[in-house]
Image (cartoon, coloured by chain):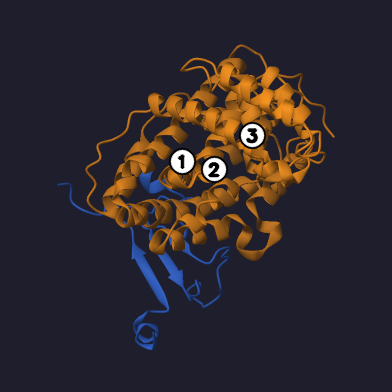
Amino acid sequence: MNDQRETEPDTAVVVCPDGPLLVRGDFEIVSTTGEKLPRDRQTVALCRCGASAIKPYCDGSHKMIGFRTEFPE
Amino acid sequence: MQFPSPRGPLSTSLIHILGHPAGQVDDAVAQFGTYVSEGIPGAGKITYDDDIQLTLFCLYELHYGGFDDADERWEWNPGLLAARQEIEAAFEAELRAAVELPALDAKTSDDVAKVLFDLTGQDSGPSMSRFVAKEATLEQLREFLIHKSIYQLKEADPHTWAIPRLKGRAKAAMVEIQADEYGGGREHRMHSTLFAQTMRGLGLDDSFGSYIDAMPALTLAGTNMMSLFGLNRRLRGAIVGHLAAYEMTSSQPNRLYGNGFRRHGFNKDVTWYFDEHVEADAVHEQIAGRDLAGGLFEAEPGLLEDIYFGACAALTVDSWTTERTMTAWQSGETSLVAPTPLMV
């Protein structure tokens, strides 16, 4: 039990294929000058495709623009 | 909620029964069982049958908020449960016959997520969201909210039934999504609270079930399908697939819905519900696809077919509902079955 507590990271970034970065855990989202940005939920999805209308958050736009994070097979 | 107006022999019989104390009208319960056995219409017709769908809705509602004037002990009455199972069996068979499932060849949780994202990315006919964004009249916006209200005023509840039936990764994912649906501990951010605020903004009554008499069978079928999947443990795969499909078809449509209400001059209090879903469901769809549906597949590979069934059924019933509403609107008619309800 203790071992797992020590090895589990407090925060994890889940790299979603063809999609956003899912950030879960204990973290803050801040501007370049350190001010906290509005955040309404514990786990967030950060835009990776550049097309979101609510950046830095994801709004699902990656699906509309065919964003791919891997080479096609 | 108040009892709805009956729509045929089954719902007349049931509402009569529910108005009495449980255990005092055994003959009527037996008669109701006979009506159900004899009254289930042929294949392909259950989803559109007003009397059947209203009856099923009332039987399910005993497990949710109940009825103001119904004895709460009816919830577990064996006669009513038996009748419900009979309707459920026919309804489930009809839904299964209506969908075409993708190949069951997934190997990993990411494979399952990919199949679900592909399924939900396919064009499924007319777009309600584009119409709402660009053309819907104020009266059509009200109708749109009325249809949605039978689920959205108890948003997330049918999927919550699944939590004790899941384990490990899938359970953690379901709880994470549902906690967000319920406002992360803040009542004013609960999605059902936000939806009620939107309804009030358009002058509509936000009490649950107040517009049930105006809803067509198909609208009731959509919410009954969720209760069918959520209340039956054996269908836990289907309720998980259903939620994944809902989350995956939410962010962009909700952006457009919000635009439709902004076009009519409504403020942020009214559009908050839609704006919230743009951001929330972009998070939820990733969790629902990979950890919830994918995680359930890894734990119980035999449920893959039902995961896809739940997703396909959600998309199919949704496309029928959209088609029905759009057809009415394009003919200049109401999509509701009772006269347009008065504003409060």
Instruction: Measure how far apart labels 3 and 2 are at the Cα level.
Output: 45 Å
For this rendering, which residue is in front, B215 or A73? B215
Colour applied to chain B: orange
Find disc 2 in the rendering and name its residue.
B255
The label number, if any, that marks residue B249 in the structure image: 1
Amino acid residing under circle 1:
Thr
Residue A43 x %, y %: 48, 65
Q: What is the chain identity of the residue bearing mark 3?
A: B
> In terms of sequence position, does the residue under pointer 1 or pointer 2 come before the other?
1
Q: Seen from this angle, which residue lies furthest top?
A: B331
Left or right: residue A65 versus residue B227 is: left
Q: Position of residue A7 (x, y in %)?
A: 34, 83
Q: The N terminus of chain B appears in which quarter of the rendering? A: top right
Residue type highlighted by circle 3: Gly
SS at mark 2 in the image: helix
**Camera-nearest residue between B181 and A16:** B181
Q: Nearer the viewer, residue B36 or B104?
A: B36
B335 in relation to A59, above or below: above
Residue B227, disc: none
* Quadrant that contains the C terminus of chain B: top right
Neighbours of disc 1 within 10 Å: few (<14), some (14-19), many (20+): some
- The residue sitting at 40% across, 46% down in the picture is B237
Chain A, colour shown: blue
Q: Tell me: A70 left or right of B145.
A: left
From this viewpoint, is residue B60 visible?
Answer: yes
**Residue B273 vertical position relative to residue B25 in the rendered view, above or below:** below
Q: Amino acid at mark 2?
A: Arg
Label 1 and label 3: CA atoms lie apart by 38 Å
Co-location on one chain, circles 1 and 2? yes
Labelled disc at residue B79:
3
Nearer mark to the viewer, of 1 and 2: 1
